[in-house]
Amino acid sequence: MYPNDGFHELGRQECLRRLAKVPVGRIVYTRQALPAVLPVSFGVDGDGAVLLRTSAASELVCAIDGAVVAFEADDVDAVRHAGWSVVVTGTATVVTDPAEIERLARTGPVSWAPSPQEVFVRIEPGLVTGRELVGGRTLYRVDLTA
C-alpha cells in the first residue's frame, strides 16, 4: 500500500473476512504476454485460499494453472464515497486430489456459467493486502461528500 494515499490499510485476517462476504471478484493474469482481467464468482476456503469453479476447457484454466496471479474483490458505496478493496496474490493451481474435489463439490463455490466438465482452481494467498475508505473521509480529514 501507499502510506500517504489517505486510505486505511486492512490486516490479512480482516481482508480474508471481507473477501468471504462478496460473490464476485476479478482475476488478473497474463494472456499472450499481456495483462488480462476477468470477473469471476469465487469462494474463500478455510485456509484463506481463493477458490474458483470453471470449465475444464476454458482459456482461463490453461493460462493460470501453475502461474502467479492476482485476485481482487471490493465493495463500494458510491453515495457515501466509502468502500474497500482486497488483493490476493499467489499461485493458482487446478485441484486434482479426488478427496479435495469431492469436498469442494459440496462446500466450494458454484459457477455462474456451469459447464459439463468443471474444475476447481485454488489461489494460495501468498500476499494479501487491502485498504478501506470509511464514510467518505480520507485520513487527511478531507470530506469527500461535500
Image (cartoon, rainbow, N blue to C red):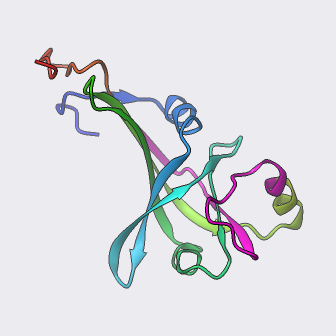
Q: Position of residue 129 (x, y in %)?
A: 41, 41
Q: Residue at x 22, y 32 (%)?
A: 3
Q: Quadrant of the C terminus?
A: top left
Asked whether, in this view, residue 68 is left or right of residue 49, the answer is left
Q: Position of residue 51 (x, y in %)?
A: 64, 55
Q: Residue at x 68, y 43 (%)?
A: 47
Asked whether, in this view, residue 101 is left or right of residue 92, the answer is right
Q: Position of residue 115 (x, y in %)?
A: 70, 73
Q: Position of residue 91 (x, y in %)?
A: 55, 63
Name the quadrant containing residue 85.
top left
Q: Residue at x 81, y 57 (%)?
A: 105
Is 2 situated above or below 89?
A: above
Q: Is 53 within the magenta?
A: no
The answer to whether any part of residue 49 appears in the image is: no
Is 67 situated above or below 21?
A: below
Is 146 situated above or below 82?
A: above
Q: Which residues are magenta?
A: 104-129
